[in-house]
Image: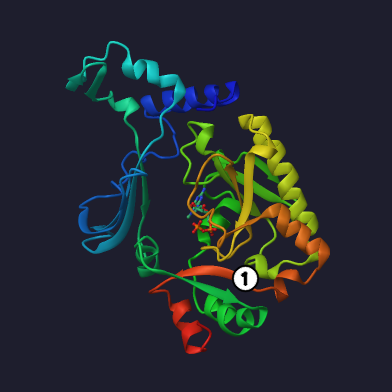
Amino acid sequence: MSPITMAERGEKRKRESEAENGGAGDSETPAGAEHPLAGFKLQSILRESARDKTIFLHGQVSGDGKSTEDAVVILERAPFQAETVTRLLGNNPELKLQLKNDIYSVYHLNPPPELNEMKTTIIRPATEKHIKKYVRQELYLIQETGEDYKNITLPFIESGSFSIKWVYNILEKKAEEDRIVHENPDPAIGFILLPDFKWNQKQVDDLYLIAISHPRGIKSLRDLNEDHLPLLKNIQQEGQAAILKKYGVKGNQLRIYLHYQPSYYHLHVHFVALGHEAPGITVERAHLLSDVIQNLELDSQYYTKCTLTYALRADEPLLQKFKEAGKC
Ligand code: M7G
């Protein structure tokens, strides 16, 4: 397990003490606010993974008044932290023997609540698209040419995709302002770097941040050309420097990439610890920022013209559009 930097330890202690004191942590239910899962009724288990210790649930919760709302809830066991394992083990009376055989023994250990965190992500109200996103399904590869993008994919994206209000909330400091790790406010080459909500920020082993570009209207890789090189290079250089300064992780230990297709059509770049096998790092989805920069240097229209391969779930309407066009 990689060590976390001193600066991070200090911040972590601050967060823990804020949480213990009922202070202003970003994951708390504000005093007096309705519980985000009030009246939760399980509708279905969308997906679960014994290996990753995660479960994705579809439920219904009480909305405004008497109405109910769909919610997606993701429960995930938090990774171990090097600095708390001693506390977890030493003289813990909750260590109960299950079996002993020669030099081998297996115990059940019930950690104290503060070391037994479960990361809980809630999306509410969740749309049909959110619910489907987490159902495990057959996948099919699409080979999207530049023409296919113009004729099939772009009209489809424009007809409706996930709201990017959360992105604008970050750029306008209406949400997550206290989590910003670095900002370059320049309207042409600026961006905000902050922890992705997949990361609990307690250990750098699964470090995961996103850089969200200040310029708006760049939907994805497909919109990039040589004019965006200064923005992309800036995200790469300043993002790496900020992560080194704050978390002590060097640029050559980061996987820095864009998704195609992304879920949210506003330019953003993923910064993930190289050793962390985060979801979405597969070859049919992740495009290394350094490769993207190089391709644009070779040909400004590279991403307008090239064929991009990606996977779509069986029930995705975009797959249907490609089928209707006789493209798969
Ligand atoms: P993407 O490539 O558009 O799609 O990445 P993906 O979600 O299928 O990977 C968007 C990234 O933004 C993901 O890594 C999400 O975990 C992250 N993300 C999504 N939301 C709604 C939020 C949010 O509200 N706050 C933060 N900090 N990260 C988010």
Q: Circle 1 sits in a helix, a strand or a loop, which is it?
A: strand
Residue 21 in view here? no
Q: Count all numbered tags in the image, as a single digit.
A: 1
Residue 54 in the image: state x and y as whole percent: 34, 46
Quadrant in the rendering for residue 179: top right
Q: Nearer the viewer, residue 116 or 25?
A: 116
Residue 70 in the image: state x and y as whole percent: 29, 62
Q: Is residue 105 left or right of residue 175?
A: left
In the image, residue 25 sits, relative to residue 82, either above or below, namely below
Callout 1, which amino acid? Leu
Residue 178 in the image: state x and y as whole percent: 55, 39
Question: How many neighbours does mark 1 have within 10 angstroms: few (below 14), some (14-19), or many (20 or more)?
Answer: many
The residue located at (48%, 66%) in the rendering is 162
Q: Nearer the viewer, residue 306 or 170?
A: 306
Quadrant in the rendering for residue 83: top left
Quadrant in the rendering for residue 309: bottom right
Q: What residue is pinned by disc 1?
A: 308
By what rule are the colours in the image chosen? rainbow
